[in-house]
Amino acid sequence: MELAGYLLKGRYELDRHLADGGMGEVWSARDRSSGAWVAVKLMRVEWTGRADLRARFGQEAVAAQRLDSPHVVSVIDHGTEDDTPFIVMELLDGVDLYATWKHARTWPLAEVAELTCQVAAGLSTAHRAGIIHRDVKPGNIFLVRTSHPEHASVKLIDFGIAKWDENGQVRTATNVALGSPSYMSPEQIRGERVDARVDAWALGVVVFSLITGELPFAGRNSPEIARRVVFGQRGPFPPGVDVDGRLERFFARAFAPTINARFASVDELAAAFVQTVGARSPLRTAAQALALAAAPKQAESSNEPAEREDSTLRLERRAAVPAGSSTEPLVVLSPSSEDVTAIE
């Protein structure tokens, strides 16, 4: 079906295809009632028959619509048209953080501190509303152009696997975990009860990657990554990155194997990082990447820190083995297959 020109809900006129995601595709559209340009996310037709995915798609809209923060994408409307769920959001002018890797492998520490504070501000708003994002990663951190050519702003997107309940209290489940393994905490991977500190862990992973150009817990595949996270096998800093040990002390706490030994909140993590590096500065590296992204598409660079975590993986714990046991099996359900692979 040709969607360009389609009038959604008698109000949103689809204009141009912008991007594809795991469950949907995003279009620019004109809101006939206000004349404003918006972004419309449509659920893929092939997924509309699955009740669980429809529920997750709707949850993204409801979760984000509850939040009022300059660092969370604004949801304007949501509903269903011809049995296809849709979400109407503000139209963002920029790129996600992952897209900047081709332009800048690492960032100055003061800029990393600024980005960390902006992401933490968005997450903190969600946490106060009883919502855990659970999938904080570069693909869900959007860099937005501002009126200042050397500045950029940050907005969180995609609350599709967030956890919350109607009373504004964090609602968790055991034995089931959702997320991207490279950015998941040990308890999240094990499918244990989680709280807002899983978002602090994931933000720590983003910070480490921006400083070093590498993921702290890397592997050949998802099971290997999960194993390294659970057993605390973090990669080293490149030579010359942490000459006085300040960053090591910060990340030792950010990635402490025991949850109570970590930062208690994203705000505490952000404040500690600012104190560690001693300054914050405008996101000039992000602004430069945005300027380059607006130029004609160039050849892809090979200096990206890791394979993109586009898909959200589902992990299930299938054996009651004490946490931390060297024999604990983890079971990973691949996003591209229904096959289950056990980590022995």
Image (spheres, rainbow, N blue to C red):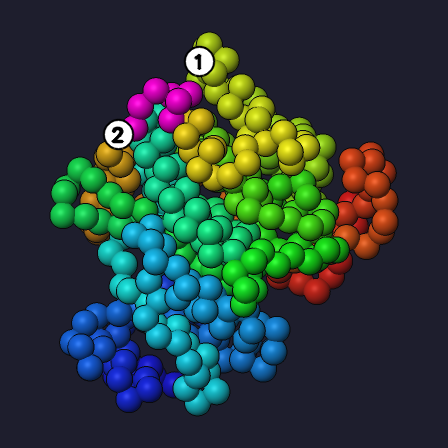
Ranked by sequence position, the earlier of labels 1 and 2 is 1
Residue holding disc 1 = 240
Check the image and report above or below for 36 versus 135: below
Residue 344 visible in the shown view: no
Point out the frontmost of discs 1 and 2.
Answer: 2
* x then y, percent, for residue 200: 52, 40
| Residue at point 54%, 67% (across, down) | 166
Q: Label 1, secondary structure: give it.
A: loop
Q: Could you tell whether 113 is left or right of 296 in the image?
A: right
Residue holding disc 2 = 281
Circle 2: is it few (<14), some (14-19), or many (20+) Cα within 10 Å?
some
To which quarter of the image does residue 210 belong? top left
Magenta range is 274-281
For the C terminus, which image quadrant? top right
Residue farthest to the top, as pictured? 244
98, 62: nearer the viewer? 62
| Residue at point 42%, 80% (across, down) | 79
69, 169: nearer the viewer? 169
Q: Label 2, secondary structure: give it.
A: loop
Check the image and report above or below for 169 versus 229: below
Check the image and report above or below for 55 versus 7: above
Marks 1 & 2, CB-CB < 8 Å contact = no
Residue 158 visible in the shown view: yes
26, 74: nearer the viewer? 74
To which quarter of the image does residue 211 belong? top left
> Which amino acid lies under the numbered mark 2 shown in the image of this protein?
Ser
| Residue at point 51%, 23% (across, down) | 250
* x then y, percent, for residue 322: 84, 41
> Which amino acid lies under the numbered mark 1 shown in the image of this protein?
Gly
* x then y, percent, for residue 207: 45, 33
